[in-house]
Amino acid sequence: MKKILVIQNKRIGDVLIASVIAQNMKSVYPDSQIDYLVYDFTVGVIENNPSIDNIIAINEKDLKQFLVMKRLIKRIKKTKYDIIFDPYSKLQSRLICYFSGAKMRIGFQKRGRNPWFKFYTHTVPLLEQKTHISGKAIEDRINMFNSFFPLPENKIDYEPHIFLTDKEKQYNKLDKYNKPAIMLGILGSTPQKSMPYDYIVTIIDHITSCFNVNVLFNYAPNQKEDALSIYEQCQNKDHIIIDIYEDSIRGFITLMNKCELLVGNEGGIVHISKALDKPTFTIFSPYVLKEHWASFEDGKKHTSIHLLEEKPNLFDEFSVEQRRKIEENPSELYHMLTPEMILNKLTPFLDLQLKAYKN
């Protein structure tokens, strides 16, 4: 029996996307043991996945401690993995790979990285551009295993999946409301991924005025004060359900599963919604590369907006130094992505997906 480890110590969306490695490797080695090493706060997106046998959950801060890292490496080495995939390739994961004893350690080739010893036995280059509707981030991970364990194209599963328990499917907190609900990711996972608040209010007011639906807010627990501030500025508060909120990943998953669709800033909740087969409208932060993270967009079920689509020559006006500072403080660029621009694309999406509930 092959023992396979996937190391994906990054964020929620990254972990969910990396689950395609397990889903496809189970087709190659049906009797294999596939384990995932992830940060503890991301476990929820891969729980109950039948392609993943064990989840090794680690605390992000603890892993920075030498003794914790040493114990983890000892544990990995003792398990005697045959194959390790390292999709993110940060220093911690590279060290785990190197000292694991695995005969096959697979990572991405990174430009300018020539270590004095080999972390990996096999490397694969990142794709130059996307060629599949799944988006470059998923394609890169498909390419990572398919370069060494090829599957016929019609056998490859490009879609991350979330698996709910029977109890989770019976989630009933929305049952007392007589209108369908939609989820709004009103705040990004970081300030750099969040729209200006007055823009968010304009979009919420438009949705609640045009459609006979209830609106739910999604935000991080530490963003509650900001979420309430946005709520207080909205016109149609009777269409906003403010008293239902889930503060865990599995809680959000069960709630999202009962919603019609998601409108939100790019991030983990978008990938979760797609894995639940829910329509999505994504608002990209100006600094995020859309071709990497925009997955399965067909202009109908899944669509999005990015500032560079509205102003394709915008960055020509920026110096190299200004471009470097975009991620640190994209606020000026976010203000250029006006509510009018967003609504021009959002309205046709909502008209199609919510045509039965239009006022």
Image (cartoon, rainbow, N blue to C red):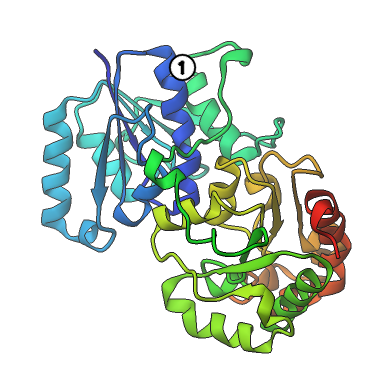
Is 345 on the left or on the right of 233, as rendered? right
Q: Is residue 338 visible?
A: no
Q: Nearer the viewer, residue 116 or 217?
A: 217
Residue 7 position, x and y percent, is: 34, 39
Q: Give the class, few, some or many, for how many residues have Cα within 10 Å of label 1's Cα (few <14, many ≥20).
A: few
Q: Is residue 88 visible?
A: yes
User: Looking at the image, which residue is at 63% across and 39% down?
Assistant: 136
Q: Is residue 333 above or below residue 95?
A: below
Q: Nearer the viewer, residue 99 or 76?
A: 76
Residue 317 position, x and y percent, is: 83, 70
Task: Locate the N terminus and report the quarter of the image it occupies.
Answer: top left
Q: Nearer the viewer, residue 268 or 257?
A: 257
Residue 197 position, x and y percent, is: 67, 82
User: Looking at the image, which residue is at 52% across and 43% down?
Assistant: 111
Is 199 on the left or on the right of 147, as rendered? right
User: Looking at the image, which residue is at 89% across and 63% down?
Assistant: 344
Q: Is residue 356 above or below residue 142?
A: below
Q: Secondary structure at mark 1?
A: loop
Is 59 on the left or on the right of 87, as rendered? left
Q: Is residue 300 above or below residue 308?
A: above
Q: Is residue 217 above or below residue 98?
A: below
Is 140 on the left or on the right of 57, as rendered? right
Count of numbered badges drawn on the protein: 1
Q: Which residue is mark 1?
A: 148
User: Looking at the image, which residue is at 30% across and 13% down?
Assistant: 31
Q: Nearer the viewer, residue 311 or 108?
A: 311
Task: Locate the C terminus and report the quarter of the image it occupies.
Answer: bottom right
Which kind of residue does numbered mark 1 sit on? Answer: Phe
